[in-house]
Amino acid sequence: MKAGFLIPIFGVLVMASGAFGTGDVDDNEGVDLRDTITVLQICAGMEADVNAEYEGKIGLKDAIFALQVVAGIIFLPKEPGDLGMPDDYEQTMKSFIDSFPDTGSYENSVAQLPETFDWRDKGVVTRAKDQRHITPADDQGWCGSCWAFAAVGALESKILMAGGPEYDLSEQQQISCNTYHYGCCGGYLNAAVFWRDRGSLRESCTGYGDYGTTTGSCGCRDEPPYIHCSKVSCGNLDTCGELSYRTDEHYTVNTGDGNEVRLSLTEDGPATFRFDTWTDFFDFWNYGSHGQVYRQSGGVQKGGHAVLLIGWDDGRGAWLCKNSWGERNGPNNDGTFYIAYSGHGNNLYFGMSNFTITDTAPTTTTTTSSTTTTSTTTTTVEPSTTTTTISSTTTTTSSTTTTVSTTTTTIPQGDCLILQNETVTGTKYETADHCIRAGSGYVVESGGDVTMEAGAIYLEPGFQAKTGSKFRATAK
């Protein structure tokens, strides 16, 4: 920052000390610079009034943040990144009440909904990420990518619900490649439609190259026509392998009916959720206490924000959401927050969309062989069983008898049986609830006979069934 720029700022601060107060120093609470902050916020075009609920918590870091805005180091966005309801919101709305055979069945299902629900208790919510990708103390502004983080968070959860592994999926793919949305200049809550025709990518391959891109540096527009902005070309991600999961059914939800929201959430899992943001939400996020519920009451409207809806609490009268502003931030110190069902000072225009997925990976492969007779044993894993014992098998080829000894494999409940670095001639794996992954170094020898039956089967690079072998894989 140039010295000539600092002189008028400090001149304003000196005048402010007489106009607004003395700027007390409190040994217990740290430096109290509320007057300075107020002037800086006015200079920055920010909302000068601080919600009284958080006033005592304002301090030096707020003055530094406001000063950075004035200096142009930080661009203060007009909106966090959600552009409002997509045009087809009403047309794609699913009615859960209509999916029941009669009113009594619907009411019965609603009556069984719990008072509190949190998908984290089921182990299917991934950690809260940070769309700024940096620590709060080094905040360099925003890419308006909340819509991408919400969609990716929903997909990560649905893969876990389907029994798949925990992935850290790529938001950059959505930002760079989903041209029906606008990258760092914002998007909508129907971004998961993008995965109908192509698979998601891993974050470890794509990285998050737009972490330093801001709505200000993009020149984003406040109203249509919007512009697409990303400093990462979609073509740069072509070398990343796509996962096999695809969006199946996608729909929006009538958020005016809380039971429709709850039924969608319990049936199809964590969902994308949007609301209009006001400046008092930022106060709440930074200074709210654990378990506190956000209820909009003041400030200036700042556009829209998209998050992941993961539960509710009727006792608090609030929805539970996972944000994308850091996994240790927010009032609950874990990246989550509660937002009231109703009672807001202004209409926040709640919106919600949800979707189901399907796995397009091939699950059945058959390799024929010569007339070799192979007898095998069958090992069955019941849903409650966690240990699979594969006993020795006997392979008979014309006049020769070969005994193949095998090992005992433990399959943790809900995990996949991993097969690799092993040469086999005859065995059968059967499990209704688990999955099997045959990967690098797993070889079915010529003349061998191997059968796999499981809830899901993945044949990964490095798997080999040699000529003359018989291999069958069937997904139940």
Image (cartoon, helix red, strand yellow):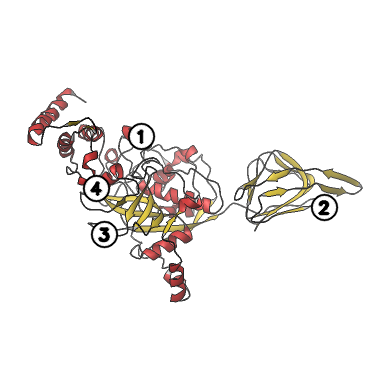
Coordinates of residue 385 in the picture (x, y in percent): 66, 53
- Location of the C terminus by quadrant is bottom right
Q: Quadrant of residue 162?
A: bottom right
Q: Nearer the viewer, mark 3 or mark 2?
A: 3
**Cβ atoms under marks 2 and 4 closer than 8 Å:** no
Counting from the top left corner in percent of width and height, residue 191 is at: 40, 52
Residue at the outermost right position: 399
Residue 286: x %, y % from top left:
29, 42
Disc 3/disc 2 C-alpha distance (Å): 69 Å
Give the residue type that dot 2 points to. Answer: Ser
Judge whether residue 109 can be spotted in this image: yes
Q: Earlier in the sequence, mark 3 or mark 1?
A: 1
Mark 4 vs mark 3, CA separation in Å: 15 Å
Image position of 122 (left or right of 407)? left
Disc 4 marks which residue? 280
Question: For residue 375, which numbered disc appears in the image?
Answer: 2
* Quarter of image, res 384: bottom right
Estimate the x, y position of residue 175 in percent, counting from the top left: 39, 44
Please tell me how crowded label 3 is: few (under 14), some (14-19), or many (20+) other residues with Cα within 10 Å: few
The residue that disc 1 covers is 135
